[in-house]
Image (tube, rainbow, N blue to C red):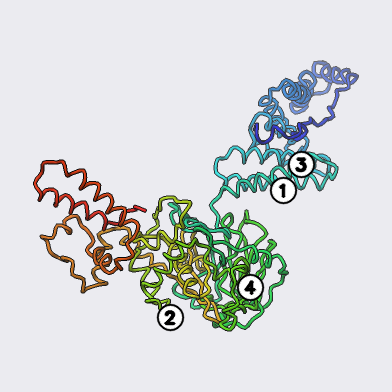
């Protein structure tokens, strides 16, 4: 309250009591009532009926106890004395006699609001809107805005606060329309909208700047939240493992893939409706029919799509389509589900190049300069690495290309094999923070397991180093079919990052991440060693020998073979550090009076540590 509503004008709580006319009893009629009572006891009067007696007694009681007038006065008195709960009870008793009175509902709502009973206040304010009095409607909408803001402020999670504040925003907007001169309603509307944007920034969203955990944090959610539902014309049109493409990230900087400023600027010049298939002929087979999508709120401002399409329509939302990278973007992260329809889409396995991709064609390859690295499409070739990091990247590239310029198909095969041989899949990768050195390069030259961002970013850097333009793509992969609704469903844990590489004519989808079905094996070092043995049956390192002390710790035999294959002139930094530690230990043991065999055995056991999957950077 201190940080939110306290700075606002005091007039924001429009709790003015509504004047209600009271019916006064006309005292001269007392004589008439007295004559009626006298008639009951007049001996020669006509015979009275039982019903007449009851009616007369009722009139007498109303005369003696004018209950409604007293209750209304009592309600007003309690409110003025700040006994808001009692005032609310009084007004609700009056509503039993006249349930549809909008003024009584309004007064009951103001009393409930002041008593802190915001749910009850909202109920009464909504009932008070059933009136033709525009002034009363204006005040009711204003107080509904205050009430829903308070309801949202009481919640802890941003995803719960946003819907309540969205309602508050709508009520303040209605109050402003009914009374354009109401400055308080306009100020409160601006205030609540700012609070909504602040709450959105606290949420985990898939934006156009994706750090190394930007996608995997959704995969690690304990509760699976629905994110996307697709209603295809036919079930058979959806492939076994579909990719629902959301956006492409053309720039990489120190572990973060993002949309470059030049591509953002180009997107602002685009106007709807979008051109058919992005203004070029599709290269994938068209999947005919109307595809309906339902995208859940508070996840991303980009819409998942099959690929290029003939036309599209988004319901009740402002959006733009960027034909260069074939992605649709809403004005902001939606706070309600977005329904949209796509006609005759294609898959995104292959995408035709746009006119802006022309400089990437082989005939323009030598036109690349450093000064143009910040401009699309040259951002898809830029490394943005320091000189030592570029040397490490080229060294890693040479281990599987043998310093040869390979065709793209052969490069893809060897690059993915090299990544899978060195790294297993896991969702729990944690690299020690190092603001000086690039995290993807450090992971790439290690043998640590990693998640989809590491594999996708590593592939993009290796492809660029080999001369192939590449970019990162985010969206959803996989999912399952729901027979009940006849739709394909994706949850937030299906979020995924993959790559696209340019072959001179088209952008090809490349997914370098190992299958997630084997993620458990990737996290287990013992499983890693078995996989390593099967990949290299000719290694000679004591494999299967129970007398070999290196196998007693469950050590991976394949690690030593990997070290033996290295060039002696290219000793990794982590191995040098381990050797220095071993030398320090041997120096410390020089003064110990122990047999030489004990020292050798201890040194051998310590030496094994250099071959463990240890996060020693």
| Percent coordinates x, y for residue 335 in the rendering | 62, 53
Q: Could you give the CA–CA distance between mark 3 and mark 1, rounded to whole angstroms?
A: 13 Å
Q: Which badge, 2 or 1, comes first in the chain's sequence?
A: 1
Pointer 2 residue: 406
Q: Is residue 157 above or below residue 74?
A: below
| Percent coordinates x, y for residue 449 in the rendering | 36, 60
**Disc 2 vs disc 3: Cβ atoms closer than 8 Å?**
no
Q: Nearer the viewer, mark 2 or mark 4?
A: 2
Residue 305 location, quadrant: bottom right
Pointer 3 residue: 187
135 relative position to 496: left or right: right
Q: Is residue 607 above or below residue 134?
A: below
| Percent coordinates x, y for residue 395 in the rendering | 39, 68
**Residue lying farthest to the right in this orientation:** 28
Pointer 4 residue: 324
Q: Could you give the CA–CA distance between mark 2 and mark 3, rounded to whole angstroms?
A: 63 Å
Nearest the eye: 112 or 415:
415
| Percent coordinates x, y for residue 582 in the rendering | 24, 50
Pointer 1 residue: 170
Q: Nearer the viewer, mark 4 or mark 1?
A: 4
Q: Nearer the viewer, mark 3 or mark 1?
A: 3
Q: Residues within 10 Å of mark 2 (few under 14, many from 20)?
A: few
Q: Nearer the viewer, mark 2 or mark 3?
A: 2
Q: Which badge, 4 or 1, comes first in the chain's sequence?
A: 1
């Amino acid at each position: 309250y201190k940080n939110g509503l306290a700075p606002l004008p005091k007039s924001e709580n429009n709790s003015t009591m509504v004047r209600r006319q009271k019916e006064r009893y006309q005292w001269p009629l007392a004589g008439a009532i007295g004559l009626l009572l006298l008639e009951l006891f007049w001996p020669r009067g006509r015979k009275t009926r039982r019903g007449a007696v009851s009616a007369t007694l009722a009139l007498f009681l109303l005369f003696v106890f004018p209950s409604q007038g007293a209750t209304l006065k009592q309600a007003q008195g309690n409110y003025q004395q700040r006994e808001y709960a009692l005032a609310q009870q009084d007004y609700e008793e009056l509503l039993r006699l006249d349930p549809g009175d909008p003024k009584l509902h309004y007064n009951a709502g103001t009393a409930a609001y002041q008593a802190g009973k915001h749910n009850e206040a909202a109920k009464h304010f909504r009932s008070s809107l059933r009136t033709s009095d525009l002034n009363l409607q204006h005040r009711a909408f204003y107080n509904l805005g205050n009430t829903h803001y308070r309801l949202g402020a009481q919640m802890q999670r941003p995803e719960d606060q946003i819907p309540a504040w969205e309602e508050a925003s709508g009520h303040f907007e209605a109050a402003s329309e009914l009374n354009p001169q109401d400055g308080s309603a306009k100020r409160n509307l601006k205030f609540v909208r700012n609070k909504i944007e602040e709450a959105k920034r606290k949420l985990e969203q898939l934006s156009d700047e994706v750090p190394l955990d930007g996608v995997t944090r959704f995969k690690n959610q304990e509760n699976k939240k629905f994110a996307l539902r697709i209603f295809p014309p036919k079930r058979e049109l959806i492939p076994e493992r579909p990719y629902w493409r959301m956006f492409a990230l053309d720039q990489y900087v120190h572990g973060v893939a993002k949309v470059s400023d030049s591509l953002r600027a180009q997107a602002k010049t685009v106007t709807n409706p979008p051109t058919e298939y992005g203004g070029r002929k599709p290269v994938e087979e068209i999947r005919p029919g109307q595809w309906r999508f339902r995208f859940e709120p508070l996840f991303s401002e980009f819409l998942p799509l099959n690929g290029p399409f003939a036309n599209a329509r988004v319901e009740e939302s402002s959006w733009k389509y960027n034909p260069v990278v074939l992605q649709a973007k809403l004005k902001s992260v939606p706070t309600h589900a977005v329904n949209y329809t796509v006609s005759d889409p294609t898959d995104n396995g292959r995408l035709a190049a746009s006119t802006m991709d022309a400089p990437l064609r082989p005939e323009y390859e030598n036109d690349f300069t450093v000064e143009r690295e910040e401009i699309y499409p040259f951002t898809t070739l830029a490394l943005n690495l320091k000189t030592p990091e570029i040397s490490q990247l080229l060294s890693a590239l040479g281990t599987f290309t043998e310093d040869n310029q390979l065709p793209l198909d052969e490069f893809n095969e060897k690059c993915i094999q090299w990544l899978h041989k060195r790294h297993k899949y896991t969702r729990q990768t944690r690299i020690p923070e190092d603001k000086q050195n690039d995290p993807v390069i450090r992971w790439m030259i290690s043998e640590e397991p990693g998640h989809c961002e590491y594999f996708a970013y590593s592939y993009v850097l290796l492809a660029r180093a080999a001369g192939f333009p590449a970019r990162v793509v985010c969206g959803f992969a996989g999912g399952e079919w729901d027979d009940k609704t006849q739709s394909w469903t994706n949850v937030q844990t299906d979020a995924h990052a993959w790559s696209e590489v340019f072959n001179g004519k088209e952008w090809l989808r490349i997914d370098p991440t190992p299958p997630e079905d084997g993620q458990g094996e990737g996290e287990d070092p013992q499983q890693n060693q078995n996989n390593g043995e099967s990949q290299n049956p000719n290694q000679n390192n004591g494999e299967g020998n129970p007398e070999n002390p290196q196998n007693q710790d469950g050590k991976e035999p394949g690690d030593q073979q990997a070290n033996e294959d290295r060039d002696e002139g290219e000793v990794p930094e982590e191995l040098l550090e381990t050797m220095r530690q071993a030398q320090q230990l041997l120096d410390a043991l020089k003064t110990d009076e122990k047999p030489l065999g004990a020292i050798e055995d201890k040194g051998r056991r310590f030496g094994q540590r250099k071959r463990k999957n240890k996060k020693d950077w």
